[in-house]
Image (tube, rainbow, N blue to C red):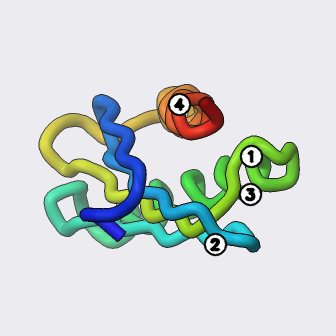
Amino acid sequence: MVRRGDKCVTNHLIGYRLPAGEARVGIIVTVKTGNAVVRNTVRRRTRSIARKLIDAGRLDGDVVFRLRGEGTVPTFSELQSELGQCAAQWAT
């Protein structure tokens, strides 16, 4: 997927996408992001935003989001804007 698909890089995540029929989303959160509570919170937020994008028809195909653990933990609004940015980039 990484070599053949589309890629989107933002401040807090890297997204990979392969065009496919049904939308499927995978989320990778590294230990560098924080403890288990922080990782699960970020994972739940990402899943919720991705589901809204899928329901709105803005996100399709096989998608993997890898959250970068290099900086601060993203807020919900930061994740929402960055996932929307990736969806818009892949729509064109």
For the residue pair 25 and 67, the one nearer the viewer reads as 25
Which of discs 4 and 2 lies nearer the camera? The answer is 4
Residue 25 drawn above or below residue 74 = below
Q: Earlier in the sequence, mark 4 or mark 3?
A: 3
What residue appears at the point 23 percent right and 66 percent down from the top-left corner? Answer: 30
Residue at the spot of label 3: 51
Measure the alpha-carbon separation of dots 4 and 2. Answer: 18 Å
Quadrant where the image shows the C terminus? top right
Determine which of the numbered discs, if any, sits on residue 53 in the image.
Answer: 1
Secondary structure under tag 2 reads strand
Determine which of the numbered discs, if any, sits on residue 89 in the image.
Answer: 4
Badge 1 local density, few (<14 within 10 Å), some, or many (20+)?
Answer: some
Measure the alpha-carbon separation of dots 1 and 3. Answer: 5 Å
Which of discs 4 and 1 lies nearer the camera? The answer is 4
Badge 2 local density, few (<14 within 10 Å), some, or many (20+)?
Answer: some
For the residue pair 78 and 10, the one nearer the viewer reads as 10
